[in-house]
Image: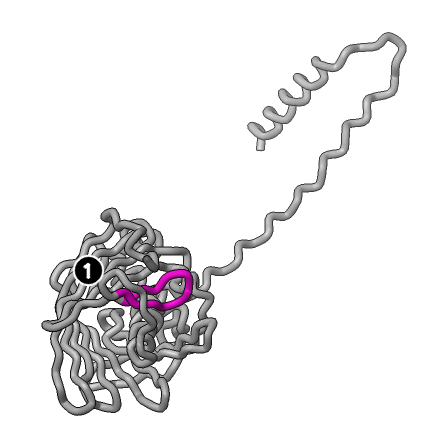
């Protein structure tokens, strides 16, 4: 108590000593009013992550961050995958059971949204070679450098491979798609979150995300009265991003397409002339 009084007395003496003395002035100066302190608002409580009530967006973002881009998320995919050059083999099974095999090359120039990208698929069969191209939001074919209009079923398959694949899941924001949480499902002992994503053209695809690995292991959709199911296998690290090196597509429980990637590289120069119609 004595120390406190001594401190206050010393401080008061210093203040008085600093005030000029005016002869004959008896009034003491009025100290300026101290401003009222502005109360600091209490910080909003952090939103708790509730795994039992996880949302569709949280599932996709966790999958993107923890699985497909190894902790770096969307910026890494945008940086690494500016271009894609992919080579492999594909097997088609027709409705009559006829099997055709082809080697393929796929080239992609990435854009801000999936529908703005340029994509070319070259396929070489034992007796023919042709290309399908997505550019300027339309599909055309190339055969011996001659432009042709693909059959409706071939064009539809090509379109579904673009807009009903993993990129529709990973880039739902850029694509302006909407999403809903579906029911949790268990398939062959594996527990899945199901996410329904619908793009701006009304194409709806359900993605099955492993609750353990946070990877898309399967997707389903319906088109033209046919129920399709695509499964993803053999995930591998490709330049710091995760890629399934094998996919299998079913139509009404019959396998119609099997694709195996041989090599895939990102960020290499891809000639823009590949995407022009002649």
Task: Give whichever of 94, 112 is nearer the camera.
Answer: 94
Q: Is residue 158 left or right of residue 2?
A: left
The answer to which quarter of the image holds residue 205 is bottom left
The colour scheme of the drawn protein is one colour
The answer to which quarter of the image holds residue 143 is bottom left
User: Which residue is at a point 19% across and 60% down the rendered structure image?
Assistant: 86
The secondary structure making up most of the magenta span is: strand
Q: Is residue 259 left or right of residue 184?
A: left
The correct choice, above or below, for 75 with respect to 251 in the image is above
The correct choice, above or below, for 233 with respect to 114 in the image is below
User: Which residue is at a point 87% across and 20% down the rendered structure image?
Assistant: 27
**Quarter occupied by the C terminus:** bottom left
Residues packed near mark 1 inside 10 Å, few (<14), some (14 to 19) or many (20 plus): some
What is the span of residues highlighted in magenta in the rendered image?
132-142
- The residue sitting at the left extreme is 126
Q: Is residue 260 visible?
A: no
Where is residue 118 shown, x and y percent of the image? 34, 59
The answer to which quarter of the image holds residue 9 is top right
Q: Is residue 41 visible?
A: yes
Where is residue 119 shown, x and y percent of the image? 31, 61
- The residue sitting at the right extreme is 24
- Tag 1 residue: 86
Q: Is residue 271 left or right of residue 124?
A: right
**Quarter occupied by the N terminus:** top right
Task: Give whichever of 37, 3 is nearer the camera.
Answer: 37
- The residue sitting at the top extreme is 23
User: Which residue is at a point 43% across and 61% down the rendered structure image?
Assistant: 174
């Amino acid at each position: 108590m004595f120390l406190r009084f001594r401190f206050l007395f010393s401080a008061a003496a210093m203040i008085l000593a600093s005030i000029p003395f005016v002869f004959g002035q008896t009034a003491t100066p009025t100290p300026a009013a101290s401003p009222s302190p502005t109360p600091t608002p209490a910080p909003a409580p952090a939103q708790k992550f509730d795994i039992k009530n996880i949302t569709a967006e949280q599932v996709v973002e966790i999958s993107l961050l923890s699985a497909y881009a190894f902790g770096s998320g969307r910026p890494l995919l945008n940086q690494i995958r500016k271009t894609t050059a992919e080579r492999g083999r594909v097997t088609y099974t027709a409705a009559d059971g006829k099997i055709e095999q082809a080697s393929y090359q796929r080239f992609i120039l990435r854009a801000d949204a999936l529908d703005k990208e340029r994509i070319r698929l070259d396929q070489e069969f034992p007796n023919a070679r042709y290309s399908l191209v997505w550019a300027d939001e339309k599909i055309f074919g190339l055969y011996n450098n001659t432009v042709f209009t693909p059959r409706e079923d071939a064009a539809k398959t090509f379109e579904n491979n673009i807009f009903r694949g993993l990129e529709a899941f990973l880039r739902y924001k850029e694509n302006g798609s909407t999403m809903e949480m579906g029911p949790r499902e268990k398939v062959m002992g594996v527990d899945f979150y199901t996410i329904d994503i619908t793009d701006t053209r009304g194409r709806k695809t359900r993605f099955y995300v492993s609750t353990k690995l946070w990877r898309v292991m399967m997707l389903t959709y319906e088109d033209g009265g046919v129920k399709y199911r695509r499964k993803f296998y053999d995930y591998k690290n490709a330049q710091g991003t995760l890629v399934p090196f094998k996919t299998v597509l079913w139509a009404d429980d019959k396998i119609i397409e099997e694709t195996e990637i041989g090599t895939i590289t990102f960020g290499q120069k891809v000639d823009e002339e590949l995407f022009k119609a002649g």
